[in-house]
Amino acid sequence: MAYAVLSRALSIVYLSIVLVLGQETVQDAARIARDLLTKNNIGTMGTVFPADHSLAGQPFALQEFHASCLHNGSLTLITFPISQHTINIRDSPKHSASIGVFSNPPGANSPRVSLIGNVTIYSHAVDMPGLQDIRECYVHNHPEARWWLPDETDIVSHWARFDPETVYFVGGFGGAHYIGYIPLEVYQDAESASYSSLLVQAQG
Ligand SMILES: *[C@@H]1O[C@H](CO)[C@@H](O)[C@H](O)[C@H]1NC(C)=O
Ligand SMILES: *[C@@H]1O[C@H](CO)[C@@H](O)[C@H](O)[C@H]1NC(C)=O
C-alpha cells in the first residue's frame, strides 16, 4: 500500500519534470537530425556485401564524406569504383546503404541519427540535376575534394545522391529526448536548426 503511494508520487514527480523541461517532439528531432547531417559532413556508411562475395550478407561500415546540399535532406556523395561501399551499393538489388552521424563532441546524452535508403550513382557528371550548385556546395564542405571531382581530373569518381527512406533518431536519454523513427515527410520538410538551442536538458 505504502509502496503503491510512493510509486504513484514518484511517477507524478517524474511527469512534472518532463513537463517542466519540455519533451522533444518528432519535429524537433527532425530539425536536430538535419542540423547534425549539415554540420557533421563526415559520417559512417553501412552497406551489405553482395551475393557473390565471400562475406555475402554481412554488414560493412566505414567512414564516408557527404554534403547536405538539398532541401529534402538527401545527401550528396562522390563515389569511387574501387571502393567496397560502391561495389556493395552497385551489386545490391536495391542499391541500399545507411549513413549515420553523431554530434561533436559525441555523448550518451547527445543526439545521433541513422538514415537508411538507397544511392543513385551518376556515370556522367552532366547527368546530375543541379550540378553547378551541388559542386559548389560539396567543395565548400570538403575543399580537398577538388582534386577528385567527377569528370574533372584523372581520378575516376562519380557524383551520387543518397535518398533516405527511413530515419532513426536517438536524441539522448529517453524521457526528455526523442528516440525512434522520424516519418520521412517530417524529415524532408524540416529546416536545419541549431540543436543546442533545442536541447531540453543539459548535456552530459
Ligand atoms: C531507391 O528507392 C526508391 C523507392 O523504393 C526507388 O524508386 C528508386 O528507384 C531506388 N533507387 C535506386 C538507385 O535503386
Ligand atoms: C531530393 O531532391 C533531389 C533534388 O531535387 C531529387 O533529385 C531527389 O529525387 C529528391 N529525393 C527524394 C527522395 O525525394
Image: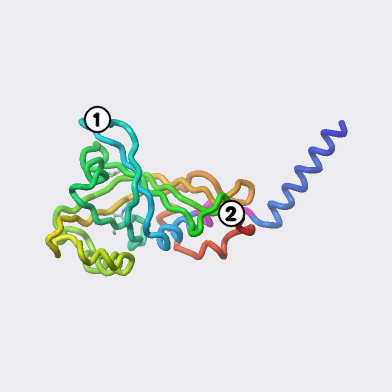
Residue at the image position 20 percent from the left and 31 percent from the top: 52
Question: Is residue 26 shown in magenta?
Answer: yes
Disc 2: CA contacts within 10 A as few (<14), some (14-19) or many (>=20): many
**Amino acid at the residue labelled 2:** Glu
Q: Is residue 51 left or right of residue 153?
A: right
- The residue wearing badge 2 is 24
Q: Nearer the viewer, residue 8 or 151?
A: 151
Q: Quadrant of ligand 2?
A: bottom left
Residue 163 rendering spot, x and y as whole percentages: 32, 50
Residue 167 rendering spot, x and y as whole percentages: 43, 47
Disc 1: CA contacts within 10 A as few (<14), some (14-19) or many (>=20): few
Q: Which residues are magenta?
A: 23-29
Q: Nearer the viewer, mark 1 or mark 2?
A: 1
Give the image quarter of residue 189. Answer: bottom left
Residue at the image position 48 percent from the left and 57 percent from the top: 103
Question: What quarter of the picture does the N terminus occupy?
Answer: top right
**Amino acid at the residue labelled 1:** Ser
Q: Nearer the viewer, residue 91 or 31?
A: 91
Question: Is residue 203 shown in magenta?
Answer: no
Q: Is mark 1 within 8 Å of ligand 1?
A: no
Question: What quarter of the picture does the C terminus occupy?
Answer: bottom right
